[in-house]
Amino acid sequence: MESGKPSYMADRTARLRAAHQLLDDDPKILADPLAVSLYGGNTESDIQEDLEFLQKPVLRRARTFMVVRARYTEDQLTEAIKRGMEQFVILGAGLDTFAYRCAESVKNLRIFEVDHPDTQRWKLAKLKAAQIGIPAHLRHIGVDFERHSLADKLTAGGFDAAAPAFFSWLGVSYYLERHAVFSMFAFIANMPPPSQIVFDYLLDETLLDEKSRQSVSSARRETDTHGEPLRTRFVPRDLQAELQSTGFCKVVRLTPEQATQLYLSGRRDGLSLDASLQLMSAIV
Ligand SMILES: C[S@@+](CC[C@H](N)C(=O)[O-])C[C@H]1O[C@@H](n2cnc3c(N)ncnc32)[C@H](O)[C@@H]1O
């Protein structure tokens, strides 16, 4: 991230989620009306003006992944809540709207939005401008994953480290150095069972097919330009094994084919995924 500035890619991701609400067929993969209001006053007309750009195949696939990953995470969280989970930590929250969208239905869930302080300040200003209130059970925690102790900051913000928690970590692992990614996994693996993390990761260069290669090249051009280079990639099977040896009991990979089957079958708008970004869930 560029020093003193909010994450450009958080803005970009939120814009793609807003585009899904406005351009794609119902039912939405992720129904997120707040994505449009949080994004800003002219979102609708801006998106219509940008239509040609946003309908490029590579950007259609990117926005499909952005909404599929959020939907999968929220589905996993719903299952965890049914089993009694009471804490939800959104790591690298960006302009995620879950806490504001679902305030009424998850009153017993304590939510912690964790993000780089520069991005978090910007989000709080956006929430205020959009007149979106902060629910009582939500806390904002400013952390730089590469410099601060997440544990200390969370505890200072009221997180109970002795109770299980569900963590989402979407759109972040590939911007960090490998050691920072594994410190995060180690921290969560040491939480009480059945703590869980759902995260996405960038597929190793050696495994990319042509479509995925195009997606990564396009993303790399953009992320390099904005000071958020792509740094860390994984081979899924190796990552699964590493998570198991870090202390997770159940590690599940959601392949692009499985995600397509779960969330895209029967759609008429032709949304599709490629293999460049993938999802994994790990339970302690
Ligand atoms: C691409 S955005 C994804 C945001 C959100 N999860 C979503 O799906 O919309 C990446 C997020 O990671 C955060 N981030 C990147 N590097 C970070 C770091 N070193 N410490 C804390 N947050 C970081 C950014 O501030 C940003 O909110």
Image (spheres, rainbow, N blue to C red):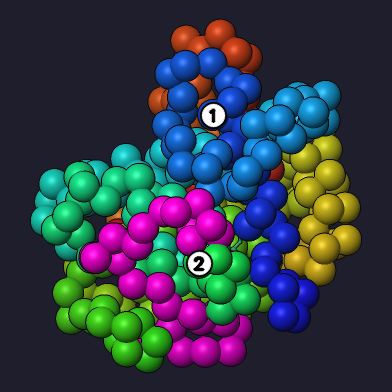
Report how far apart the C-alphas of labels 2 and 1 lie in the structure. Answer: 22 Å
Residue 156 position by quadrant? bottom left
The residue identified by callout 2 is: 124
Image: 176 above or below 262: below
Q: Nearer the viewer, mark 2 or mark 1?
A: 2
- The foreground one among 256 and 134 is 134
Identify the amino acid type marked 1: Gln
Of residue 278 and residue 69, the one placed in the foreground of this image is: 69
Label 1 packing within 10 angstroms: few (<14), some (14-19), many (20+): many
In the picture shown, does residue 222 fall above or below 151? Answer: above
- Magenta segment: does it hold 135? yes
- Residue with the mark numbered 1: 21
Q: Which of marks 1 and 2 precedes in the sequence?
A: 1
Q: Is residue 105 among the parts visible in the rendering?
A: yes
* Element type at mark 2: helix
**Horizontal and vertical percent for residue 18?**
58, 37
- Residue located at (52% from left, 43% from top): 37
Query: In the visual, does 85 lie left or right of 141?
Result: left
Residue 23 picture quarter? top right
Please tell me whether mark 1 sits on a helix, a strand or a loop: helix
- Quadrant containing the C terminus in the rendered view: bottom left
User: Which amino acid type corresponds to the residue marked 2 in the rendered image?
Assistant: Leu
Question: In this rendering, is residue 220 above or below 218?
Answer: below
Point out the stretch of residues depicted in magenta.
126-151
Q: With 14 as the anchor, is 45 left or right in this view?
A: right
Image spot of residue 258 (x, y percent): 46, 30
Label 2 beta carbon less than 8 Å to ligand 1: no
Question: Which quarter of the rendered picture does the N terminus lie within?
Answer: bottom right
Residue drawn 54% across the image and 29% down it: 21
Nearest the viewer among 168 and 109 is 109
